[in-house]
Amino acid sequence: MTTSQASSSTRLEWHHCGDGADDSDPTGCRGVRVAGYERCLAHLSEEAREAYISSLGRGHDVDHRGTRFSRELLAQVLAAVDDGAGRAYFRNAQFDEAVFEEEVDFSKATFYGASAFRRAHFKGKAGFSEADFRDSSSFRGAIFEATAHFTRAEFSRAARFGGVQFKGYAAFGNLKFRSIARFEKAKFLNSATFVRTVFSHEAQFEAASFARSVRFSEAIFTKQADFSQVTFQDRTSFGGASFEGRVKFSGCSFVGQSEFNKAKFSSEVKFEGVNFRGDVSFVESLFEKLSHFGPVTCNGMVDLSFAVLESPVTLEIAASRLDCRRTRFEATATLRLRYSAVDLSDAVLGKPVSISASHGPFELAGGGTLQEKFGPNLSERVSINAVRGVDASQLVLTDLDLSRCRFSGAFNLDKLRIEGYSQFATTPRGIHRYFILPFQWTRRNAIAEEHYWRAASGRMATGWMEDSSGQAATRSVVPDDLAAIYRQLRKSLEDSKDEPGAADFYYGEMEARRKSRATSSRSEKALLSVYWLVSGYGLRASRSFVWLASVLTVSVISMMLWGLPSNPPRTITSGMYVGNSVTLSTIPEKPVLEKTTDKLTWRRFERSSRMVANSIAFRSSEQRLTAPGILVEFICRLLGPLLLALSILAIRGRVKR
C-alpha cells in the first residue's frame, strides 16, 4: 500500500472536499469543505474563493483542515484577517493535516482562540516569529521539512509539539511558554535552539531526540522539566540555564559534548542512568538541593570545577576523568567512583567528603545495573591526581590509587583519613647502576612528589616516574617540602593504626632530611647517613642483622687472632715473714700472646664466640684478654646490643597494626 493510499484510507473527522477521487484514491482531496460550499478553499472556483475571502475579517474563525496551501492562497487568508498593520488576527484556527506547499509566514500573527496544526505538513520554511498564541495550541505530529522559526513567539496556554518532526533548523529562541510545553517524542533532525526561552510551567521532552546540536543556553525553567530518555546525538548546551523546579535527565544519552556551565539547579535534579559518550561540563554550576547525582557513565571527563553543591549529596560516577578543581562542597558529600582519575586541586570542603572506589557496576533504582562501555586500556582503579589546596581534615579516601597523587600544598594532611586498600607508588624495582656500581632501591611506598623530584634530579633517576602534568608546583618541590609531607602523612597513618604504612613514610621523611641542603647541618647529615646505612633508619631489620652478623664475625676473628692470650694467665702469690706477721701479695700475670701460638684452632674459636656472646648480653666473660681483646670486647658491648635493638624495632614496626 502506498503512502497516498494509506492516507486516503484514514477516516476523516470532517466533511472533505473529495476533488480528484477515483478508483485508486476514493477519498480524493482531504481538505475540509468551506462553509456553504462543496469544496475546500484550494478547489473553490475563483468567484467562490473571493467571496469567502472577502467574508473574513480581523479575529474570525478559520477552518482549513487537510487543505493544501500555496504561498499565494495563504497570503490571501492572512491578508483577510490582517489588522492593517501587518499582523494577522485569528480567533479559532484549525489547520490540522493541512499541507503548506511553499514557505509560510505566520510571523506576528495573533491566535485569540485555540489553534491546531496537528499533523500539518510544512514543505517550505515555516515562520511563526513573534506569533502570539493566546489559547491552547497543538502541532502534534506535524512535519517541518525546512527551517521552523518560533523566535520571540509567546504561548499563553498549553503548547503541544509531541511527535513533531523538525527536519530543518528549529528556532525557539527568546520564546515564552506561559503554560505547559510538551515536546515528548519530538524529533529534531537538524540543529535546534532554545536560547533564553522561558518555560513558565512544565516542560516535557520525554523520549525526544536531537540528531544535531541543541542549545538551551540561558533558558529558564520555573516548574518541572522532564528530559527523561532523551537522546542528544551532537553537542548539547544548557549553559547558564536556570532550573527552578525539579528536573529529570534519567536515562538520557549524550553522544556529543555536553555542557551545563553556570547552570542553576534550585530544586532536585535527577541524572540516573545517564550515558555521556563525550565530555560533560558543569563548570560554575550551582546545585542547591541536589541529593543524588547518578549513577552516570562518561567516556570522557566529568568537569565539576568551580561548581557549588549546597546540600548533602551522593555522586555515583563511572568516568575516565573527574575534575573537581575549586569545587565547593558546602555539605557532606559521598563520591562513589569507577575508573576515574580525580583532580581535587583547591576544592573547598565545608563538611566531610568521602571518595571511594566502587568494585562493581552501579545499580539502578528500577532494578538492573548501569551499562558501561569503556575501552580495554582503561584501568578500573580510581585514582586521585591532586589534593593541592584542600583541607584534608575533611577528606576520607578509600580503596583508591594514590600513586600519582600530588599532596604538596594541602592543609592538615596529618588529619587525612586513608582507608581500605589505597595504593601508593613504590620505589623502582630491579638492579640499577650508578656509573658502574650496581645498586637496588629499598622497597617501600613513595609519594608522587618524591618520584618527580628524583626523576628531575638527574642522578640515579632511572625507574622513577616523571611528572607529565606540566604543573610547575610539582617541579618546585624540594626535600624540605617532602619531609613535611611525609611527616604529616605518617601521623595520619599512625592515627589510623597503620604502623607498616607509617613506617614507609617515616623512611621517606628521613630520606628527605638526609638529602636536604637547606636545613640539615653536616653533622646531622653524617649522623643520618650512618643511621640509614646501619639500619635503614631503624626500619630495615635485614640491614641491622647483616651488620650485627658482620660485627660478631669480625669480633670473633679478632679475638682469635689478637684478643686471647696463648695460655690463661696465672696469678703469682708471694709472702714475707716479719716477726710474728706474714705479708702476702698477689700479682696477676700479664696476658701474653706468643707469636708461635696456633691462633686458628677450634678451642680458641669456642672461647672467642663465648666471650663475644657474653659481651653482647652485657655479661662478663671472666677471662683475661690482651689489650686488643679488651678493645674488641668494648666494641662488642657497644655495637652488639644497639644493632640487636634496631633489628627488633624494625621487625616490630612491620608486624604491628
Image: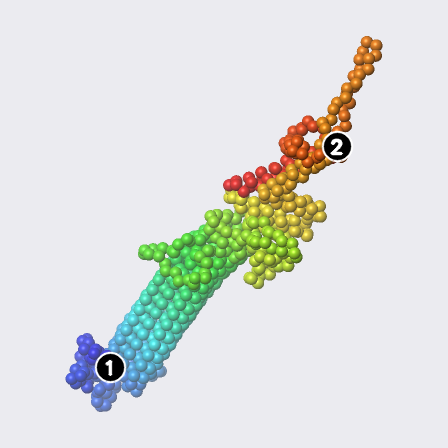
Q: Secondary structure at mark 1?
A: loop
Q: Quadrant where the N terminus lies?
A: bottom left
Q: How many marks?
A: 2
Q: Where residue 480 sits: x, y (%)?
A: 64, 51
Q: Where residue 592 sits: x, y (%)?
A: 76, 30
**Of marks 2 and 1, the one in the foreground:** 2
> Can the viewer see residue 431?
yes
In the displayed structure, would residue 507 be above or below residue 155? above
Which residue position is annotated with label 2? Answer: 593
Tell me the crowding category of disc 2: few under 14, some 14 to 19, or many 20 or more residues within 10 angstroms, Cα based.
some
Tell me the crowding category of disc 1: few under 14, some 14 to 19, or many 20 or more residues within 10 angstroms, Cα based.
many
In the displayed structure, would residue 55 be above or below residue 231? below
Q: Amino acid at mark 1?
A: Thr
In the displayed structure, would residue 355 be above or below residue 161? above
Q: Earlier in the sequence, mark 2 or mark 1?
A: 1
Asked whether, in this view, residue 591 is left or right of residue 56, the answer is right
| Residue drawn at x 55%, y 45% as measured from the top left | 502
Give the label on residue 67, or none.
1
Residue 77's quadrant in the figure? bottom left
| Residue drawn at x 38%, y 70% as measured from the top left | 233
| Inter-mark Cα distance, 2 to 1 | 132 Å
Asked whether, in this view, residue 387 is left or right of residue 69, the answer is right
| Residue drawn at x 67%, y 34% as measured from the top left | 601
The residue lying toward the viewer, choosing from 39 and 510, is: 510
